[in-house]
Image (cartoon, rainbow, N blue to C red):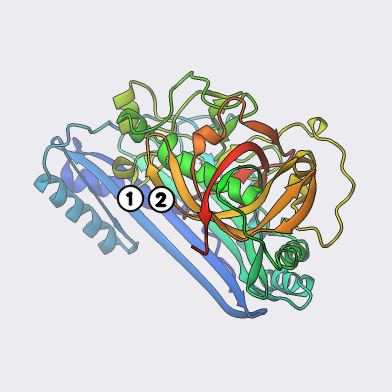
Amino acid sequence: MTAEIVRTGAELELAARVIELVREVAGPAAEAEVTVRHDAEALTRFANSAIHQNVAEATTTIRLRLHLDGRSASSSTTVVEPAGLRGLVERTVTAARLSPPDTTWPGLTRPAPLHGSAGHHGSGPRSGLDFGFDEATARATPAERAERVRDFVRAADGLETAGYCRTTYTSAAFANSAGQAVEGRTAEAAMDGIARLNGDDGVARLAGGRLAGLDGAALGARAAAKARAAQGPIELPPGRYEVVLEPEAVADLLDNFAVFGFNGKAFAQKQSFAELEAEQFDPAVTIVDEPLGSRSEPAAGLPFDVEGTPRESLVLVRDGVTKAVAHDRASAADAGTASTGHASPTSRSWGPMATHMRLEAAPAATEPEVPPAGPDSPIAESARPLVSRMERGLLITDFWYTRVLDQKALIITGLTRNGVWLIENGQLVAPVSNMRFTQSYPQALAPGAIRGIGSESILLPDRWSGTRYAAPALHLASWNLTGNASG
């Protein structure tokens, strides 16, 4: 079963039909915005080194938000027939009339072209259908995903393996009663797998806009090398250690920065560490939210948000200076600024969040030359130059089960996972048992705290639906390990 590609313009026609129904049922004074979104996901899962599940799901969801007589309500449906659309409108109008006054209603997005669609002219819908969309990925078959799984399992060379290969396709349109009408589509492929030996796991992950860019054999070999190198771990005492974090661990930093730090609602409520124009990070740090992709990678997200605001790259931190936080129309109104295109169905409750953050890699010329790694090295290629500089510290693959202890300072506690090694004089000395840490993430990246950044940002699969982060390896002066995971 392959994903069905929705006819161009189909979602926009549905959205326009709902807007007309709103005018018919509620009158011309009603302010309405409609998002029609078709999501198709196909997943090939494997465990015990064999595929055990192939599933595919496709859903079209219509979401209506309505503001009528100073009151607001929203509702959604997956029934696209005329009776379903009318039912959606009628129950949303009824809900709005029964709701309390909404004094924070930010108004509707005015008609505006999508960024990157400079060729558009006239008053018709602005199209985002040309943002590097890879149709081959959207139409990927189970056999194509199974090829990547087969290559992963074979490359693990007898180790027990588990994981998934996934392809997704989204096409969507937005229309509102103020005349904004936009559409776009995106596709993604991702692979996440482990290799296991004597209870120790090695992991390898990768995401991208093209299934053709996923090399199952390379990922399987990397996971197996980590599992083999993790045998016979030693325990180290708690304390502050110099560390090299591989991209998987760095993605957890970006995830928590997005949810709790660069969140416009948290910023407005003074629950965020972010201070605009302050030098809060090491000068080596530049963080950008890139929903439209990069020069080498197709768009990761849709080119507009659920309020119809066009999206573009947003620089959150430049050369260590905090420059922006993510806003929807409500948080932007509170802050006296403009929306950055980060509205979501939950952003008025949880706040707007950046979902495609990239920590910029360092220029390759800044890294020392190191000899090629052997096939059994557990060190990610992007981390090897950083490890070669470390006198004594830890190489950490991944974090998990991270929880916030202090949101304002963004103090996080969590566990290491999927491989930790002691490094002395640039050489791997011994595997280390997993440890608990308690660390302020902004403090770990503060001025003077970064000793090196890898030369390549690696795209990693989402931890939550709709998010994807690109991260290089990071060499940090200090990381606070507070206990051994065994007790």
Which residue, given by chain and number where applicable, does mark 1 sit on?
Answer: 17
Left or right: where 113 falls relative to 389: left
User: How far across and down, in percent of the image, does residue 195 sit?
Assistant: 68, 70
What residue type is disc 2 on?
Glu
* Mark 2 burial class by Cα count in 10 Å: few <14, some 14-19, many 20+: some
Which residue, given by chain and number where applicable, does mark 2 sit on?
Answer: 13
Q: Nearer the viewer, residue 186 or 244?
A: 244
Q: Are marks 1 and 2 in contact (CB under 8 Å)?
A: yes
Q: Residue at x 23, y 46 (%)?
A: 22
Q: Residue at x 85, y 61 (%)?
A: 375
Q: Could you give the CA–CA distance between mark 1 and mark 2, rounded to whole angstroms?
A: 6 Å
Mark 1 lies on a secondary structure that is helix
Left or right: where 396 falls relative to 266: right
User: How far across and down, in percent of the image, does residue 133 sit?
Assistant: 62, 49
Answer yes or no: is residue 354 visible: no
What residue type is disc 1 on?
Arg
